[in-house]
């Protein structure tokens, strides 16, 4: 813990009178975009690992230390309270490890986890198992989280085939709305199609965000190939489509 204490001391120096003007100006509100940015950079580094991940985890840790220090200055809590809180929570939510509870598998672990959460003081106000899912989540992430929460209490398809049939049903309803030029209903039906697709991916064990990221990268590399091999401003669709098919063969 020597280096962790060193990090705390450095941050206290930066926030102290005579420290860094920028660091001293920061508040919980101003740090919000930095926390989000560092989170996404950490997610990207997780695909690389090694020193890249080590560096980004450090940046993420800084955000936790920074916010905890601001809260300490305001008399609310400090980093030790944060660590104690999560340590106590881990023990409390793992009675099958630290207590006498017995579970059959990881699915049962998650069921107990949700029940224990609802009994905790900070969650006493929650009336639904869906309470607590941030509305600020990216839409795909929130859709997946809503489905996973409902699935934990048995509200789920038994097989992926059921979810596939539901998706096909939603696609037909989307087509009907499109045929009727019903713009408002079309928006709703497109949302239903996406939500049902998230369900299919979840039941198939596929992280829908990772799947879409992979497709985004594929599109990016193939379109750049098209750009590199023609005058993109002057080329017609047939030329670009031909180069796109070349890219599909040449790029992995």
Image: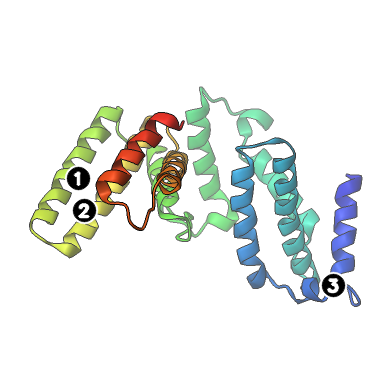
The secondary element bearing badge 2 is classed as helix
User: Residue 182: which quarter of the image?
Assistant: bottom left
Asked whether 66 or 218 is in front, the reply is 218
Q: Is residue 199 visible?
A: no
- Residue receiving disc 2: 189
User: Residue 37: which quarter of the image?
Assistant: bottom right
The reply to whether callout 1 and callout 2 are in contact (CB within 8 Å) is yes
Rendered location of residue 125, percent (x, y): 49, 60
Label located before the other in sequence (3 or 2): 3
Mark 2: few, some, or many residues within 10 Å (few <14, many ≥20)?
Answer: many
The reply to whether callout 3 and callout 2 are in contact (CB within 8 Å) is no
The secondary element bearing badge 3 is classed as loop
Rendered location of residue 183, percent (x, y): 17, 63
Rendered location of residue 19, percent (x, y): 88, 73
Residue displayed at 41% across by 46% down: 223
The secondary element bearing badge 1 is classed as helix
Residue displayed at 30% across by 47% down: 194
């Amino acid at each position: 813990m020597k280096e962790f204490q060193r990090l705390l001391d450095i941050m206290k120096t930066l926030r102290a009178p005579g420290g860094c003007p920028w660091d001293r100006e920061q508040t919980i509100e101003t740090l919000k975009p930095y926390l989000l940015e560092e989170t996404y950079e950490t997610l990207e580094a997780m695909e690389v690992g090694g020193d890249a991940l080590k560096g980004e985890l450090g940046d993420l840790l800084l955000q936790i230390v920074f916010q905890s220090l601001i809260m300490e200055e305001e008399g609310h809590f400090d980093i030790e309270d944060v660590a104690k809180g999560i340590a106590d929570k881990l023990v409390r939510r793992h009675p099958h490890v630290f207590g006498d509870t017995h579970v059959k598998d990881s699915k049962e672990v998650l069921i107990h986890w949700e029940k224990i959460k609802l009994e905790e003081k900070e969650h006493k106000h929650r009336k639904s198992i869906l309470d607590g899912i941030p509305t600020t989540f990216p839409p795909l992430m929130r859709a997946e989280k809503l489905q996973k929460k409902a699935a934990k209490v048995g509200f789920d398809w038994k097989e992926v085939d059921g979810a596939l049939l539901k998706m096909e049903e939603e696609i037909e309803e989307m087509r009907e709305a499109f045929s009727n030029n019903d713009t408002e209903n079309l928006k709703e039906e497109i949302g239903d199609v996406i939500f049902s697709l998230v369900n299919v991916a979840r039941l198939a064990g596929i992280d829908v965000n990772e799947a879409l990221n992979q497709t985004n990268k594929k599109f990016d590399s193939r379109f750049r190939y098209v750009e590199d091999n023609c005058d993109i401003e002057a080329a017609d669709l047939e030329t670009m489509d031909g180069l796109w098919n070349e890219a599909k063969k040449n790029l992995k």
